[in-house]
Amino acid sequence: MKIAFSPCPNDTFIFHAWVHGLIPGAPKLEVTYADIDITNSLAATCSGPEVVKISYAALPWVLSEYALLPCGGALGRGCGPLVLMSSRAANTGGPAVLTGKRVAVPSERSTAYLLFRLWVSQNVPGGVSDIVILPFHEIMPAVRDGIVDAGLVIHEARFTYHTYGLTMLADLGSWWEAETNLPIPLGAIIARRTLHLSAIADWIRASVKYAWSHPEASQEYVLSHAQELSPEVAKAHINLYVNEFSVDLGETGYKAVNALLSRAAQVGLVPRVDLVPDSAYII
């Protein structure tokens, strides 16, 4: 079975057991490791993988071919994307300092960018000028080097941005939670509708539970894909993004996803969808 997910610690931690043949009855996986911008694009093609990690923001465009699985993704509190600037620029004012500025983002259809657009519409008079798409690990160096004025970052960047001399202008997860009192939906696991979806969900849940029961087993695998992160940062990343929603979105998780996509649809940023949870997956 072909699967695509990011090389980030939360994904490699979650899928380690399945990738290494430790889940009884689960098929062997052929893995593509790629940044979210690439996995979003893969899911939009006819030849995309059977199972793929995408941004929740990209979900409305792929639901005709893929179903949202209720596990394995990234959704939580205190884990939202950050807007970063150089310390000097960020200290010149609040969010309005972004007016007319050039901003790097990790993907046009990332949840981070969708949140950013919603936040900008409320907080940045006149909006920004240019959006530059960069792999997420290139964003902080681009801000530091003055290639862009600001950057929208995800994942472990929240633990490392200070080493680039950058300052947080806004925590979009905190903004979202204050607005909605809901967790932030970041990354979704989807599978082709032609597959045995409940079985795939069971294998993913088993892989998550194995990772929690054997936290040291995945360490070498996680660090080999973690783009030179220290073990401490990789562990902090996993602790933040792998949580109860990784096993089951539940009522709160689905409510958060619907809230994000309905707000975005109201202002024309995504097609309108109405997601209703099934016992195993959205149909």
Image: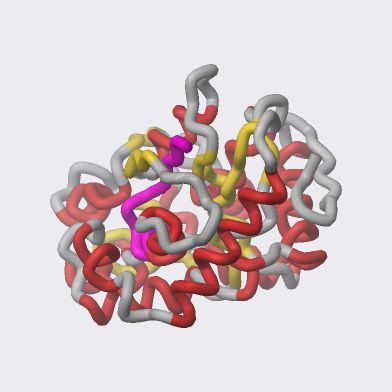
Residue 128 occupies which quadrant of the picture?
Answer: top left
Given residues 159 and 128, the one toward you in this image is 159
Residue at left offset 27%, top offset 73%? 219
Q: Is residue 202 left or right of residue 282?
A: left
Number of disc labels: 0
Residue 228 picture location, percent across and down: 16, 63
Query: Compared with residue 49, is residue 149 higher up or lower down, i.e. above or below?
Result: below
Residue at left offset 54%, top offset 45%? 55
- Asked if residue 124 can be seen in this view, the reply is no
Query: Compared with residue 14, is residue 97 higher up or lower down, i.e. above or below?
Result: above
- Asked if residue 6 can be seen in this view, the reply is yes
The magenta-colored residue range is: 1-12
Given residues 179 and 99, the one toward you in this image is 179
Residue at left offset 31%, top offset 69%? 167
Residue with the most extreme top position: 46
Residue 174 falls within the magenta-colored stretch:
no
Q: Is residue 164 left or right of residue 28?
A: left
Residue 237 picture location, percent across and down: 38, 72
Query: Compared with residue 256, is residue 128 higher up or lower down, i.e. above or below?
Result: above
Q: How is the image coloured?
A: secondary structure
Given residues 261 and 283, the one toward you in this image is 283
Residue at left offset 22%, top offset 69%? 220
Residue 75 picture location, percent across and down: 59, 63
Query: Compared with residue 100, is residue 7 higher up or lower down, i.e. above or below?
Result: below
In the picture, which quadrant includes the C terminus? top right
Residue 9 falls within the magenta-colored stretch:
yes
Residue 62 picture location, percent across and down: 64, 29
Q: Is residue 122 left or right of residue 211?
A: right
